[in-house]
Image: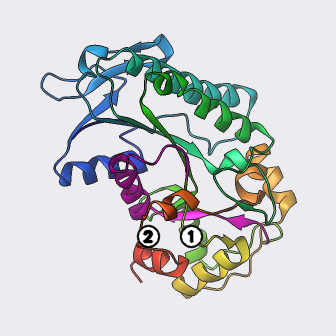
């Protein structure tokens, strides 16, 4: 297959490009700089509303991962950048795909479990309604922006990703230094649910989605057993053989990170990968301790 990937330089994007290439697929990256001759990359510039549609034709699938990082303090300016990059970038790409003849068969577009907001211990499946707050609003608009592609008959999939676990980057890489020094501990009450997924399983899930025509709409990209922050903390401490007695109180989270800390560190999302399970997807790492040991090499 010929597959286009945006956000190809990030943790997930670089892994999916490597995986698809190793599997024998031809991969073209969407890049913001002018690509070199013969690179196979495709130029786009969301801020200027430009996509080189001449190079998009004939592709089988598009994996859209690009967007401003959410892991930053949410100033008014940062919020505008986050919302614009996700909503406008997705809309621009969807409009470009709609113009192709024939269009690609599938668009796998990133979203996040932030769609559900803070829901305590409620079990959340793909048919659960959206939550409240900035991140939930962004996710809702982000997913709606694929509508032009859907109208063109493209199978649009919204990949609601949880916390991606890898020692190469993301949340786990940021957690490891303090935990290795014995300075890790529960965040807030520790009762909030963390819905996570191993990077290897996320990459495999994307490949599975591309190859499975029956999958469309929202897909929860999380492992089958979410854990509370307290359980996550204990498990990581066990794997590292370090104490976990340095809690981070809720007031400190809000002081350090503001609204972003509330949404990413204190909010509870107990998410089930219902559609992946029904479709026959098999998780390599369904249990937290196993993926932590694999990522850390213990």
Give x and y (percent) for residue 198: 46, 65
Q: Residues within 10 Å of mark 2 (few under 14, many from 20)?
A: some
Q: Which mark is residue 178?
A: none
**For the residues bearing labels 2 and 1, Cβ distance under 8 angstroms:** yes
Q: Assign the N terminus to one quadrant of the image.
A: top left
- In the displayed structure, would residue 283 be above or below residue 238? above
Secondary structure beneath disc 2? loop
Instruction: Give the extent of the magenta segment.
Output: 191-219
Q: CA distance from mark 2 to mark 1?
A: 8 Å
Specify whether residue 289 is painted magenta.
Answer: no
Q: Quadrant of residue 144?
A: top right
Label 2, on which residue?
283
Label 1, on which residue?
224
Left or right, 283 with respect to 102, comes to: right
- In the displayed structure, would residue 277 be above or below residue 134? below
Residue 170 vs residue 100, the one in the foreground: 100
Residue 190 vs residue 180, the one in the foreground: 190
- Which of the marked residues, 2 or 1, is nearer the chain's N terminus? 1
Give x and y (percent) for residue 163: 57, 58
Image point 41% across, 69% down: which residue?
Answer: 282
Left or right, 194 with respect to 146, comes to: right
Image point 55% across, 25% down: which residue?
Answer: 147
Image point 73% across, 76% down: which residue?
Answer: 230
Image point 32% across, 17% down: which residue?
Answer: 100
Residue 60 vs residue 109, the one in the foreground: 60
């Amino acid at each position: 297959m010929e597959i286009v990937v945006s956000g190809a330089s990030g943790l997930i994007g670089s892994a999916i490009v490597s995986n698809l290439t190793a599997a024998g697929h031809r991969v073209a990256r969407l890049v913001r700089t002018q690509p070199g001759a013969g690179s196979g990359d495709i130029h786009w510039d969301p801020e200027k509303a430009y996509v080189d549609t001449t190079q998009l034709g004939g592709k089988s699938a598009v994996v859209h991962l690009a967007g401003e990082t959410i892991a930053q303090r949410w100033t008014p300016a940062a919020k505008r950048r986050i919302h614009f990059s996700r909503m406008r970038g997705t809309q621009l790409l969807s409009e470009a795909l709609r113009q192709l003849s024939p269009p690609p068969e599938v668009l796998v577009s990133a979203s996040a479990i932030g769609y559900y907001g803070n829901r305590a211990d409620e079990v959340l499946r793909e048919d659960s309604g959206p939550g409240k707050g900035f991140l939930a609003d962004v996710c809702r608009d982000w997913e709606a922006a694929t509508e032009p592609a859907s109208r063109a008959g493209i199978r649009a999939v919204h990949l609601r990703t949880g916390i991606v676990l890898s020692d190469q980057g993301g949340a786990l890489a940021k957690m490891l230094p303090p935990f290795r020094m014995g300075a890790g501990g529960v965040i807030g009450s520790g009762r909030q649910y963390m819905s996570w997924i191993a990077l290897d399983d996320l990459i495999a899930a994307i490949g599975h989605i591309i190859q499975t025509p029956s999958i469309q709409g929202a897909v929860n990209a999380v492992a089958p057993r979410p854990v509370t922050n307290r359980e996550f903390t204990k498990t990581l401490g066990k794997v590292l053989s370090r104490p976990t007695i340095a809690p981070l109180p809720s007031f400190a989270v809000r002081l350090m990170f503001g609204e972003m800390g509330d949404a990413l560190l204190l909010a509870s999302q107990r998410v089930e990968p219902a559609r992946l399970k029904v479709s026959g997807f098999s998780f390599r790492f369904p249990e937290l301790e196993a993926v932590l040991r694999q990522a850390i090499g213990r």
